[in-house]
Amino acid sequence: MPINVTAIPGLPDHVNDVRLRTAALINEEILPREDQLFAVRRGRAVTDEEKARAKALREEVKTKVKAAGLWAPHLPQEYGGMGLDFLAHAYMNEILAYALGAASLFGVVAPNSGNQKILVKYGTEEQKRKWLLPTIEGTMESGYSMTEPDNAGSDPRSIKTTARREGDEYVINGHKWFTSNGLDADFFIVMCRVEDPSAEGGRSGSMSQIIVPTNTPGVEIVRGIGIWGHPTSDHCEVIYNDVRVPAENVLGRVGQGHEAAQDRLGAGRVFHCMNSVGQMWRAFDLMVERSLTREVHGGLLKDKQFIQGFIADSYMDLQTSRLLTIRAAEMIDRGDPRVRTEISALKVYVPAAFSRVADRAIQVWGAAGVSNDLPLAAMYLGARTLRLADGPDEVHKILIAKNVIHQYESGQSWDFAR
Ligand SMILES: Cc1cc2nc3c(=O)[nH]c(=O)nc-3n(C[C@H](O)[C@H](O)[C@H](O)COP(=O)(O)OP(=O)(O)OC[C@H]3O[C@@H](n4cnc5c(N)ncnc54)[C@H](O)[C@@H]3O)c2cc1C
């Protein structure tokens, strides 16, 4: 069935306009041809000819997306993007995520999209020319290299990878892993601890992000780490052994790395969670549609109370996730600094709700639910991963509690007007 999107009364016109135009493309160009468009990821394109056919079809859809003015919702207009406010972007993500993988047809491909946002904000004109524009044009790939096997990723200030200043260069040494897109990337943005007497002090004072071309001597891609039972993936273990890059490759100021990482991950969580909401809609639709037709033990699934419970619980998970996420997007657009608490709340709540909804949809579909014929298995694994990536649940719960307690300790109860 097509995605059922109509204008929402009270929403600004430009937001409804983006929603309706995105839904039209999803319904007309993507859903009817999902199997062919995503043939490679679904294991249906094996020969070179089949892969080439899938690629050509994807390019055809991308051209239509660009012609419709829906390309790169995460980028400012001066870089060929849509220049959307947070609310419009969040609502658009809800719709484009309905077809799993469709974001890439709209020019949003992680980790490139996150790196592009850092380069837009912190890059010099030269860095933008050299690294940002090629990723937008699709001639370069990138990765983001922060997490280390021997130090807690949930405490980024514990990072040990060093960048020692020597003349006009930095010499990088360290061990990273889960650097996504590591097999294809032309450059990594590497989070380092700069050893430089002139750097600003403080524990995170010397944290910096440095652009490292992956073909620099000393960059060793050890392996694509196998995850979820698969023997390999593009999430790579990387060793940096005396890697020399020009000092001009530092992004922003030395010592600004932590702030830039928060920029990359912080507000981005709203978009990731709205992607999850879009996928939850798909899982929900699949679950309900199946329950209308599948007969078991002399009746349709829809008439069994266990299944009705699945539907009701999933509806509540979905709508709660959606409200939390939209409200955070509205607060960001209003410039409300208190949104930090809401972002952590949705980052904990939405992936867990998404897991529950995908889990129930799989149960309703039986064996087909875990097959690659449906997007449910991929959603389920993705939702579980989201509880770790971009800050694990516990770290966000600590932040929520800290902010709440701080408010009460300062003599005020929680503000109902948020
Ligand atoms: C598929 C995938 C892709 C990824 N892509 C990237 C990437 O491109 N680039 C990159 O740099 N990283 C990437 N990551 C890594 C991810 O960001 C980290 O896994 C995450 O930040 C958690 O760090 P960690 O794995 O070191 O866990 P740790 O920091 O060791 O934490 C382990 C667990 O400890 C618990 N915990 C943490 N703090 C507390 C606390 N204060 N109190 C109680 N419990 C706590 C949590 O349950 C947490 O899950 C990716 C991860 C995955 C799974």
Image (spheres, rainbow, N blue to C red):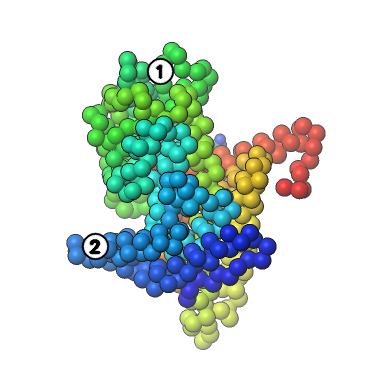
- Of residue 74 and residue 291, the one placed in the foreground of this image is 74
- Amino acid at circle 1: Glu
* Residue 310: image tag: none
- Does residue 365 appear in this view? yes
Above or below: residue 79 compared with residue 353: above
- Of residue 295 and residue 414, the one placed in the foreground of this image is 414
Above or below: residue 345 compared with residue 105: above
Label 2 SS: helix
**Residue 69 on image: x %, y %:** 45, 59
Residue lying at 42% horizontally and 42% vertically, measured from the top left: 116
Q: Is mark 1 within 8 Å of ligand 1?
A: no
Residue lying at 61% horizontally and 54% vertically, measured from the top left: 326
- Of residue 97 and residue 367, the one placed in the foreground of this image is 97
Label 1 SS: strand
Above or below: residue 285 compared with residue 145: below
Residue 143 lies left or right of residue 411; in this view the side is: left
**Residue 109 on image: x %, y %:** 39, 51
Q: In the figure, residue 111 lies in which quadrant?
A: top left
- Amino acid at circle 2: Lys
Residue assigned mark 1: 195
Residue lying at 50% horizontally and 24% vertically, measured from the top left: 204
Residue 212 lies left or right of residue 320; in this view the side is: left
* Residue 51: image tag: 2
Above or below: residue 66 compared with residue 175: below
Q: Residues within 10 Å of mark 1 (few under 14, many from 20)?
A: some
Q: Residue furthest right?
A: 411
- Does residue 363 appear in this view? no
**Residue 259 on image: x %, y %:** 52, 32
Number of marks: 2
**Residue 139 on image: x %, y %:** 29, 47
| Sequence-wise first label, 2 or 1 | 2
Residue lying at 23% horizontally and 62% vertically, measured from the top left: 52
